[in-house]
Amino acid sequence: MQTLKEIITIVPKLPPEIDGLGDYGFRLAQQLFADYGVRTRFIVGDPNWSSNTLSHSSTVSVRSPQALSALLPPLDQVVFLHYAGHGYAKRGCPFWLVQALTEWCRMGGRLITMFHELYATRPLLSSALLTSPLQKKLAIQLMQISDRVFTNRQCYAEKIQMLSHHREVTTLPVFSNIGEITHPIPLQARSRELVIFGSSSTRQRIYQQTSLLKRICQSLEIQTILDIGADIKLKSDLPIRQLGIQPAEQISQILSRASAAVVDYPMDSLAKSGIFASYCSHGLLPIVISSRLHNQDGLEMNRHYWLANCKLDLNQAQAIATAAYTWYQTHSLKVQAQSIAQSLELFIKL
């Protein structure tokens, strides 16, 4: 076993660019170093990404097996892959990535894979769905060559167990990429502010539901809606204050004092929503707008989040906020770093 406490992590991109997998991998690496002294060297899968500040990273010159193989470490080191096919290829089929890692593993390399997604399954007419059989084939190949496997949804874990030789797959819903707080203040002591945070498209969908937002504001006595993200054109009589794109630390401060926040995300996939995770980790009331009503991953509607489909008093809102925060603690950043470190102990001395 090697004595140098270093791993190589593969991500599509890294900060300062906005990328869910990159942010996740970067924050996890920071925690692994803080808690266990494990250093991370990154391999970035986007040839167009560059940084003048991250000296511990390398970027593939092109997306080819040869380019990636040239950056892979000696066989006594561990590679940690953050995988979602669309992050490494336009239509979700990164043949170059899977081929290079397969050859490296055949020579004795050790691979840990975090499956953020498996393959396209939604009934949508898109190029990603049309390539679903190829995506599935590549995902299965990665499952088979991986020594340890993690994922963020229990249904993904069950699929991985069915499709591969892995009988133990660790499920870890995503942590908050904008930070966490340890002692959230009660809702009654918070400002009467409602946060809407996320991509332009998801926020636009939320604002289209004007009557629902008005009902939420009335029920919670909201005085101001704080809009966080890239500027969008809004025509509304709601009390909206557009804050634009904000750094993670500032978003964390806003969530720490706000009473509630809205996310537009399928209920059956909330465990992989970084926005939902950020709400839960800051102790406010998460409000979910969803077209697919299905509980999963230990989450229950109107217990861990509010659907705004019933009346809510302050005590009920506080109970939901507390339950959401408690659920989050089972897979916080620190907990996930511990789980990854325990897997690394099989290969390196910590």
Image (cartoon, rainbow, N blue to C red):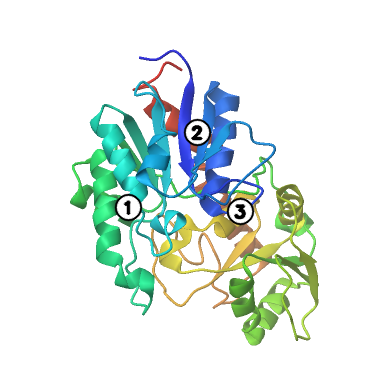
Type of amino acid under label 2:
Ala
Quarter of the rendering containing residue 122 = bottom left
- Residue behind mark 1: 95
Q: 327 above or below 315? A: above
Judged from the image, the secondary structure of the residue bearing numbered disc 3 is helix
At label 3, counting other C-alpha atoms closer than 10 Å, the crowd grade (few under 14, some 14-19, many 20 or more) is: many
Q: Position of residue 285 (x, y in %)?
A: 63, 61
Q: Residue at x 65, y 49 (%)?
A: 178
Q: Residue at x 32, y 39 (%)?
A: 101
User: Which sits earlier in the primary sequence, circle 2 or circle 3?
Assistant: 3
At label 2, counting other C-alpha atoms closer than 10 Å, the crowd grade (few under 14, some 14-19, many 20 or more) is: many
Q: Nearer the viewer, residue 270 or 5?
A: 5
Q: Position of residue 278 (x, y in %)?
A: 61, 53
- Residue behind mark 3: 278
User: Which sits earlier in the primary sequence, circle 3 or circle 1?
Assistant: 1
Judged from the image, the secondary structure of the residue bearing numbered disc 2 is helix
The quarter of the image holding the N terminus is top left
